Image: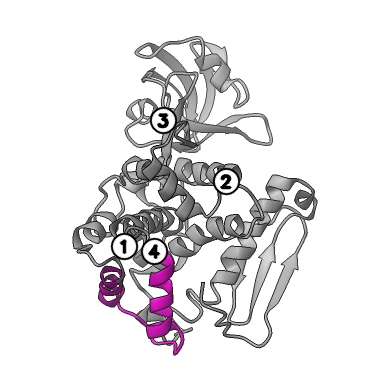
């Protein structure tokens, strides 16, 4: 991508293979990775490991050297606030999917499967309709790593939505320029102007550079997708590239709560979706579910028991709420999507086939 411009003499990967730890942390000439050692035997999990490697290594350019103005000089005595972390992490997350594909580590099917999981994670987070992306970046210090039971209702990760916006931006630049330019060109331009000499960019300079590469007005694009909670038109952007998004509906009516068993085999509510039947009925996180319509319930039997009912039916839920035994009425809703799948359009147009081949650099 950067024409062989490698800004280090020696780079070190520090890999910890123990337990179930997963994650990474970038440094200027190294990265620290954590990945379960036994999972490298499985091909799909090995591919996921390679995405982690690609992510942290790309931070060598994007973040460690090419970084927002607020991070130009690191202040280790206090928080460093910036609305641009979506670009630092979202763009990096987008490329950690593409680099292994382009390098031949995995094929288009695995790429689309991974993209599907990312889209599912994004669309399954109600907070995307509450917190704008720029605010998510700004609030990183006080929210992202201090999650509570309501976090999914009130916020969206700048990793998750940032990656979605990076995807849309890349596809938009490709179409606007008839594939003469892409997000790759933007990264090279930003590197030359800011990253090579470690000059921090402002949000305004970042958008101006995007417009210069795309050669079109992107003010509306960035206003909508950075500063509002308008839904991202993922399908509209993917369709010209021969892709479509299909959803899988749950086999049970909508209840709106995630339930897990604790060490004592009690069914404990972990999360209640905003506006869901469970929330409307007054069910809260940490409530202990006892029974559905008089029958004992556990986390393992919860969904199976819901299969006995239809949308619109009202069921009696017995629970402990702050040690008080209660019975509440829950009116079940229509089944909701549980997953989204990005699929190839079976018979793409010549334009769609060309767009897809130029973007993914490989035939499906």
Q: Is residue 47 above or below residue 28?
A: above
Q: CA distance from mark 4 to mark 2?
A: 19 Å
The magenta-colored residue range is 183-212
Q: Which residue is mark 3?
A: 283
Residue behind mark 4: 182
Find residue 2 and report its horizontal and vertical position in percent.
Answer: 51, 76
Q: CA distance from mark 4 to mark 3?
A: 48 Å
Of the residues under marks 2 and 1, which one precedes in the sequence? 2
Q: Which of pointers 3 and 2 lies earlier in the amino acid sequence?
A: 2
Q: Residues within 10 Å of mark 4 (few under 14, many from 20)?
A: many
Q: Would you call the spot at circle 1 few (<14 residues within 10 Å), some (14-19), or many (20 or more)?
A: many
Tell whether position 21 is magenta. no
Q: For numbered disc 1, what is the local secondary structure? A: helix
256 vs 25: above or below: above
Q: Mark 2 or mark 1: which is in front? A: 2
Specify which label sits upstream in the sequence, 4 or 3.
Answer: 4
Q: Residue 258, percent across and down?
A: 50, 33
Precedes in sequence: disc 4 or disc 2: 2
**Alpha-carbon neighbours of circle 3 within 10 Å: few (<14), some, or many (≥20)?**
many
Kindly report which numbered mark, 3 or 2, lies closer to the viewer in this rendering.
2
Task: Tell me the residue that label 2 is attached to.
Answer: 108
Q: Secondary structure at mark 2?
A: helix
Relative horizontal placement of residue 131, taking residue 248 as reference (left or right)? left
From the viewer's perspective, is residue 235 above or below residue 18?
above
Marked residue nearer the N-terminal end (1 or 3): 1
Give the Cα distance between marks 2 and 1. Answer: 31 Å
Query: Where residue 134 is drawn, which disc sits there?
Result: 1
Mark 4 in CB contact with mark 1 (< 8 angstroms): no
Foreground mark, 4 or 3?
Answer: 4
């Amino acid at each position: 991508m950067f024409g062989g411009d490698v800004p280090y003499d020696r780079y070190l990967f520090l890999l910890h293979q123990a337990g179930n730890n997963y994650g990474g942390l970038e440094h200027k000439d190294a990265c620290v990775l954590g990945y379960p050692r036994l999972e490298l035997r499985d091909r799909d999990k090995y591919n996921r490991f390679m995405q982690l490697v690609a992510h942290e290594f790309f931070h060598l350019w994007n973040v460690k050297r090419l970084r927002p103005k607020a991070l130009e000089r690191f202040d280790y005595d206090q928080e460093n606030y910036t609305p641009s972390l979506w670009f630092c992490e979202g763009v990096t997350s987008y490329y950690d999917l593409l680099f292994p594909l382009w390098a031949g580590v995995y094929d288009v099917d695995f790429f689309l499967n991974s993209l599907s999981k990312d889209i599912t994670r994004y669309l399954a987070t109600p907070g995307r309709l509450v917190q704008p992306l720029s605010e998510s970046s700004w609030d990183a210090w006080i929210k992202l790593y201090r999650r509570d039971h309501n976090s999914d209702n009130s916020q969206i990760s700048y990793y998750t939505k940032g990656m979605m916006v990076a995807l849309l931006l890349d596809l938009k630049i490709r179409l606007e320029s008839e594939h003469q330019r892409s997000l790759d060109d933007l990264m090279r331009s930003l590197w030359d102007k800011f990253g090579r000499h470690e000059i921090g960019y402002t949000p305004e300079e970042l958008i101006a550079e995007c417009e210069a590469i795309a050669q079109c007005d992107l003010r509306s694009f960035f206003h909508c997708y950075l500063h509002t909670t308008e839904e991202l038109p993922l399908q509209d952007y993917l369709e010209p590239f021969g892709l479509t998004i299909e959803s899988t509906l749950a086999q049970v009516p909508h209840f709106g709560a995630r339930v897990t068993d604790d060490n004592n085999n009690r069914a404990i509510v972990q999360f209640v979706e905003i506006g869901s039947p469970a929330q409307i009925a007054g069910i809260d996180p940490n409530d202990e579910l006892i029974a559905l319509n008089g029958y004992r319930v556990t986390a393992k039997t919860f969904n199976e028991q819901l299969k006995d009912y239809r949308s619109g039916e009202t069921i009696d839920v017995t629970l402990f709420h702050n040690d008080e035994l209660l019975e509440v009425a829950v009116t079940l809703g229509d089944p909701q999507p549980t997953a989204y799948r990005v699929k190839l359009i079976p018979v793409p147009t010549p334009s769609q086939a060309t767009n897809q081949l130029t973007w993914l650099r490989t035939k499906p």
